[in-house]
Each structure stands twice: as structure tokens, then as C-alpha cells.
């Protein structure tokens, strides 16, 4: 399974267009000096979509982690459009986090 399997996935293709403003693995330092690194953040004006890639099975800590990214971006005055976990294995499973 290659990178194209992700970028061309029907649920993800719109997040991999050339005209997007994207941060990949960009460090964000919190007020309490923690460093968070999300796999991908797509910016659209004052809204963001957070995408995090995982292997293995679903775990609660994955949801907690992406929600931590979202809380930090909200503190920075961004609106959260979507939070997406992409599980990579034999098949790609996309889970939107509420």
C-alpha cells in the first residue's frame, strides 16, 4: 500500500489537492511548553482540518490526541472543520472524530 492509496482514497482525495495550504508534521508549542506534532493540518481561511495517520487498531488515545490538537488550534482562534483519523493497514479506514 503506497502513499497514492491515501491521497486517492475517495474520503480523503479532497484533502490532497495542490491548491491547499498544508502543514505536515509541523510543531506547535503549547502555553505549558508541550510540543504537539500533527501529521497533517489543512488550512482554509480560519478553519482547519486535522488528519492523523495511525497503524494498528483503534485506540482511545488516538481520539484524545487529535482532540488535543483541535483544542490547541481553537485556542489559536481557528475553527475546526474536521478531525480525521486514517488507519493504514491492508485497507485504509477513515474515521471522523466528533
Image: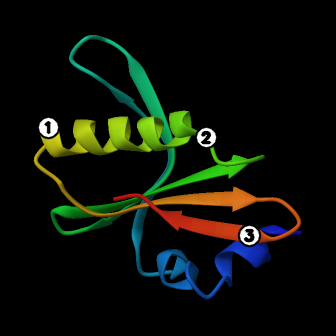
Which is more toward the observer, 77 or 84? Answer: 84
- Residue shown at 67% from the left, 82% from the top: 9
Coordinates of residue 97 in the picture (x, y in percent) = 41, 58
- Residue shown at 10% from the left, 47% from the top: 77
Q: Which residue is mark 2?
A: 59
Q: How is the image coloured?
A: rainbow
Coordinates of residue 35 in the picture (x, y in percent) = 42, 21
Q: Is residue 33 above or below residue 39?
A: above
* Mark 1 residue element: helix
The quadrant in which residue 62 appears is top right
Q: Quick one: quadrant of the N terminus?
A: bottom right
Coordinates of residue 26 in the picture (x, y in percent) = 47, 40
* Mark 2 residue element: loop
Q: CA distance from mark 1 to mark 3?
A: 31 Å
Q: Which label sits on residue 75?
A: 1
Mark 2 nearby-residue class (10 Å; few <14, some 14–19, many ≥20): few
Q: Which residue is mark 3?
A: 92
Amino acid at each position: 500500500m503506497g502513499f497514492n492509496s491515501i491521497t486517492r482514497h475517495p474520503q480523503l482525495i479532497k484533502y490532497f489537492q495542490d491548491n491547499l495550504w498544508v502543514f505536515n508534521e509541523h510543531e506547535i508549542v503549547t502555553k505549558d511548553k508541550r510540543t504537539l506534532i500533527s501529521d497533517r493540518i489543512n488550512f482554509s481561511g480560519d478553519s482547519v482540518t486535522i488528519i492523523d495517520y495511525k497503524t494498528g487498531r483503534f485506540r482511545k488515545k488516538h481520539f484524545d490526541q487529535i482532540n488535543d490538537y483541535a483544542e490547541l488550534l481553537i485556542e489559536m482562534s481557528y475553527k475546526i472543520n474536521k478531525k480525521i483519523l486514517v488507519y493504514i493497514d491492508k485497507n485504509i479506514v477513515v474515521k471522523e472524530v466528533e
